[in-house]
Image: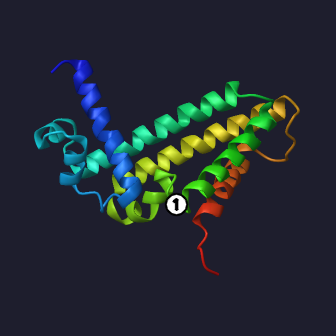
Amino acid sequence: MNKQTEHDTREHLLATGEQLCMQRGFTGMGLSELLKTAQVPKGSFYHYFRSKEAFGVAMLERHYACYHQRLTAHFTSGPGNHRDRLLAWYQETLKQFCQQGAISGCLTVKLSAEVCDLSEDMRSTMDKGAQEIMALLARALEDGRNSHCLHFTGQPLPQAQVLYACGWAPICRPKYP
């Protein structure tokens, strides 16, 4: 198996696993179902991941890396000024979740409750990913302040933490009062 094939198989397992987790959750996604859906033999899974938990960590790392890459591109080269980009990010996030349902659009929201008690490694990976996204938001806020299109008091990181929390609040709220 050459390096490209190995990368492709590993990536295919991670992408398939993320799709299944979005539908069923991490504990609801059986290893047999993952392997059958991905059309990958069981031995291949254990070639890349020592356990289902290690797979979950890699899946979360991949998820956050992709999200971070998309946000970085948006905040650095998206249309408009820094304020416009932040507003567009928030509006697009809200629109996406409204269209897809309460928690169906984000692996973080989908897995957060289940992972906190299930796996310290996965919880830690999720926390690290969220911290990196908040740091990226803080840089976007600071860039906006430096270019005089955003005005706020205090440090950018606490502001970014509030924005991040506000981004998840509408999608985490219960459907019933």
Q: Is residue 23 above or below residue 40?
A: below
Total tally of numbered discs in the picture? 1
Please provide percent x and percent y for residue 60.
40, 45
Q: Quadrant of the C terminus?
A: bottom right
- Density class for disc 1 (Cα within 10 Å; few <14, some 14-19, many ≥20) is some
Amino acid type at mark 1: Ile
Disc 1 target residue: 103
Seen from the viewer's position, the closer of residues 123 and 48 is 48
Quick check: can you spot residue 7? yes
User: Tag 1's secondary structure?
Assistant: loop
| As drawn, 25 above or below 44 | below
Q: Residue at x 67, y 45 (%)?
A: 92
Q: Residue 26, how many percent across, how many down?
A: 33, 57
Q: Residue at x 19, y 44 (%)?
A: 50
Q: Position of residue 145 (x, y in %)?
A: 83, 35
Residue at the far bottom: name it. 177
